[in-house]
Image (spheres, coloured by chain):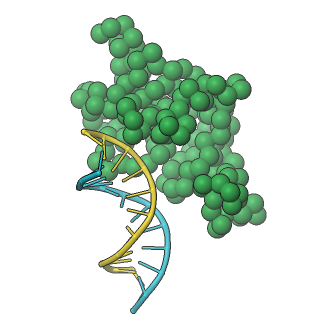
Chain colours: A green, B cyan, C yellow
DNA sequence: GCCAACGTTGGC
DNA sequence: GCCAACGTTGGC
């Protein structure tokens, strides 16, 4: 049974259009430097799982859907002193940070705004909506995933 | 720009 | 192990 996830990113840094423009629409989800988020990627994500692609900060909203196409492997950007996410405590021999590869599936014609999620029945317990939630990678319940997709389709149909 | 909430660091 | 200080995230 595939699980569902949410990937958070600032669109000014990496947007769903950026992902869609890559060859095959595939990108590694590198740069995560939070242990809880890492553990989700390293231990729980499986090929074929689906994820919501969330834009934070500017027009906070769910922008589309991605799929996990490669399970976790070491995040080599942690080894590069020139990289913004460099971490000297991570080495090729003892990698500390991990990432998965995601593939672009779909961009919503009408992104689902955060403020709409907040008022939608069935999403009360969504991790994203919890006060002070700052996780950049988090699980999403199957029902929650379906509700968000339905909201996007409703918006596309002018409802 | 503001500020609440969070994770990490480091002194003790 | 505790906790204050700090830097960061992210909504508004």
Q: Residue at x 65, y 66 (%)?
A: A88
Q: Quadrant of the N terminus of chain A?
A: top right
Give left or right: position of A156 versus A117. right
Q: How many marks on residues?
A: 0
Give left or right: position of A103 versus C10. right
Q: Residue at x 51, y 21 (%)?
A: A107
Between residue A45 and residue A37, name the one nearer to us: A37
Seen in the picture, residue A54 relative to A43 is either above or below; the reply is: above
Image quarter of residue A59: top left
Give left or right: position of A153 versus A159. right
Residue lying at the far right of the rendered structure:
A93
Q: Residue at x 76, y 64 (%)?
A: A93
Inspect this view and state whether residue A149 appears.
yes
Q: Quadrant of the C terminus of chain A?
A: top left
Where's residue A118, x and y in %?
27, 33
Between residue A7 and residue C11, name the one nearer to us: C11
Where's residue A119, x and y in %?
24, 29
Residue lying at the far top of the rendered structure:
A157
Inspect this view and state whether residue A95 appears.
no
Q: Residue at x 69, y 48 (%)?
A: A73
Where's residue A150, x and y in %?
38, 18
Where's residue A40, x and y in %?
53, 47
């Amino acid at each position: 049974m595939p699980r569902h996830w949410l990937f958070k990113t600032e669109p000014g840094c990496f947007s769903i259009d950026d992902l869609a423009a890559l060859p095959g629409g595939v990108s590694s989800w590198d740069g995560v430097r939070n242990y809880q988020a890492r553990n989700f990627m390293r231990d729980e994500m499986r090929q074929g799982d689906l994820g919501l692609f969330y834009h934070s900060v500017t027009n906070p909203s769910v922008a589309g859907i991605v799929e996990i196409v490669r399970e976790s492997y070491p995040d080599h950007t942690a080894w590069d002193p020139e990289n913004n996410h460099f971490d000297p405590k991570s080495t090729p021999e003892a990698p500390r940070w991990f990432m998965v590869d995601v593939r672009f599936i779909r961009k919503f014609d009408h992104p689902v705004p955060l403020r709409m999620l907040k008022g939608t029945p069935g999403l009360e317990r969504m991790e994203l909506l919890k006060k002070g939630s700052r996780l950049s990678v988090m699980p999403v319940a199957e029902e929650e995933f379906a509700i968000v997709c339905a909201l996007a389709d409703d918006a596309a149909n002018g409802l």
